[in-house]
Image (spheres, rainbow, N blue to C red):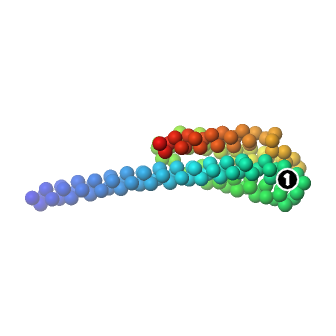
Amino acid sequence: MKIKLQSLGVILIALLLSGCSVVEDVTQSLNYTDEASQFINETVAFANQVPQLAQEAANNSDILGQLNTQLDQMKQSISEFNGLEAPAFAQNFHEQLTSYNETLSQQIDEYSTQIQNGVTDFKNTEMAQTLGQIEGVLEQLRGLGE
């Protein structure tokens, strides 16, 4: 009888532990999805703000400072997002977005160099295309939640 109770106890503990693992996986998945959505929304806002700031920065040093701040903040956000650990179901999604992010980070560096040389024209940069690709990933993210 005592052995049966011990066996039952071990089985119950195993079930509880496996249940905790499932809960942790779900929590990690939800957290990742939330963080990815926030990052993409931040990137979309960046894409909407930068062209106007770039245009105004040509004649206004205060706006130029704001533009440089936006670029620095975006690079920081990229670095933080790329450091996230994606759950298994989102691994391909994360790799694709990380690749776009690396490209965007390089383009931000190039654009920052242009700004230092007095060129603020945003329309002729490749950043706009990369930002559009990242925005397109938002639809894929929404599909992951379904």
* Picture quarter with the N terminus: bottom left
Task: Point out residue 22 in the picture as x, y percentages from the top left corner.
Answer: 37, 51
Residue 67 locus on image (x, y percent):
79, 55
Is residue 85 visible from the viewing direction of this image?
A: no
Residue nearest the viewer, comparing 120 with 113: 120
| Residue 69 screen position, x and y as percent | 76, 58
Q: Tag 1, which secondary structure?
A: helix
Q: Is residue 6 left or right of residue 111?
A: left
Residue that appears at 67% across and 48% down: 44
Q: Quadrant of residue 9?
A: bottom left
Residue farthest to the left?
1
Total count of labels? 1
Q: Amino acid at mark 1?
A: Glu
Q: Residue at x 17, y 59 (%)?
A: 6
Task: Judge whether residue 61 can be spotted in this image.
Answer: yes
Residue pointed to by mark 1:
56
Indicate the position of residue 126 as horizontal and vertical percent values. 75, 39
> Which residue sits at x=47%, y=50%?
29
In this view, the residue in front, 64 or 116, is 64
- CA neighbours of label 1 inside 10 A, class few (<14), some (14 to 19), many (20+): some
Instruction: Give the camera-side residue of 90 and 56.
Output: 56
- Given residues 11 and 136, the one toward you in this image is 136
Task: Examine the rendered structure and indicate whether residue 63 appears above or below residue 91.
Answer: below
Q: Is residue 69 left or right of residue 136?
A: right
